[in-house]
Image (cartoon, helix red, strand yellow):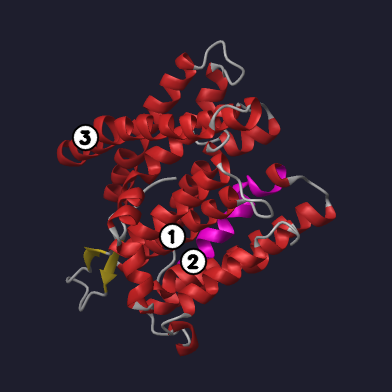
Amino acid sequence: MTDISATHVVPPRSVADKGVRTRLAYLDGWRGLSIALVLIGHFFPVPGINLGVLGVEFFFVLSGRLMAEILFIERYPLKKFFKRRFSRIYPALLIFVVVTLIALSGTFVAFKWKAALTALTFTYNYAGILVTRAGALDHIWSLCVEEHAYIILALISATVPGRNRVIPLLVTLALLAMANGAVSYWVFRLDYEHTYWRTDVHIASILLSASICLLKAEGRLPAVFMGRHVALAASVGAVVLFLDPVSTPIHYLLAVPLLALAVNALDFSSRTLSGLLSSWPMATLGLWSYSLYLWQQPFYKFVYEQGSNPWLMLACVFACALCSYYVVERPAREWLNRNW
């Protein structure tokens, strides 16, 4: 998943005094928890719950919060916003797709240039369910949803004046997307991928979190949701609702709103929780999370479909991801941001 900087906006005192973004380590830790859930769910699955799917929702609600801060509170210039998104996302993605296209040739997870093209154009989530799939690229569906959300939220920020209009719009779109998913799954009997890979369904996770973030910024979030233990309680409730016996649409109708509340309530959480998330291991995992997310998928397929040693495959994930982060992702981002 993409890595929007885990920062917090101090509300501006005037139009000219833009918000000052300060890094919040517990949001890096939340992202670290997200990628940890994905890795555990893929390489050491826990019976009764799909932690990989749950980890993606942790990513999405964080993105919703951060995009709301950047686009609607700080009012970040859109040209600069998209340049920074490109520098963060595309170099590492391009190298991942090209390297795996070549390295996996001849294996059971080999894919061709058409699949690579859908990944690089952020159309894989629809192409994967309507045209063709590639196991090593299946995780790109979530990156597509996030990129589409960037565009939609940027358009709203540019065309809809005032948060008083933005918040109802975001809530309405989120409810429509949630209903779309429930109808697709329950009424039309579509499977998980045909329902929840689609941006028109899954964007609800991002929009709900963005809505709560803006309510908080407006001082309209009820006090009951700003308690010290709300973030932890909401997160635990969401995990329970993601258990396998719970019908899939319930995950997205009830559990995801709880996660959206949780990530926004972290600002009020106890020192124990924020300290745990801010710890070096969690925050560092958060910094590496995008590269880890890119590179875990092909190695996961070797474990899931061929029974390869999960510890060995996980070690390979970290080796490739750290090379990606320190050789490609971070240098490319810094160079592009400095020179573009």
Quarter-of-image position of residue 84 = top left
Residue under numbered circle 1: 62
- Taking the image as shown, residue 309 lies to the left or right of residue 5, namely right
Q: Tell which tag, 2 or 3, sits nearer the viewer.
A: 3
Q: Which mark is residue 246?
A: none
Residue under numbered circle 2: 209
Q: Is residue 151 visible?
A: no
Three-letter amino acid code at disc 3?
Answer: Pro
Q: Position of residue 203 (x, y in %)?
A: 56, 55
- Taking the image as shown, residue 221 lies to the left or right of residue 339, namely right
Mark 2 and mark 1: Cα distance apart in space = 7 Å
Q: The residue tagged with tag 2: helix, strand or loop? A: helix
Dot 2 or dot 1: first in sequence order is: 1
Rate crowding at label 2 as few (under 14), some (14 to 19) or many (20 or more) other CA atoms within 10 Å.
many
Rate crowding at label 1 as few (under 14), some (14 to 19) or many (20 or more) other CA atoms within 10 Å.
many
Q: Which mark is residue 331?
A: 3
Q: Main secondary structure of the magenta part?
A: helix
Give above or below for 175 relative to 302: below
Q: Does 164 lie within the magenta span?
A: no
Give above or below for 339 relative to 115: below
Three-letter amino acid code at disc 1?
Answer: Leu
Q: Position of residue 287 (x, y in %)?
A: 31, 48
Q: Which residues are magenta?
A: 194-211
Quarter-of-image position of residue 118 = top right
Residue drawn at (51%, 29%), measured in percent from left and top? 299
Give above or below for 211 relative to 48: below
Label 2–label 3 contact, CB within 8 A: no
Q: Residue furthest top?
A: 106
Residue drawn at (43%, 56%), measured in percent from left and top? 33
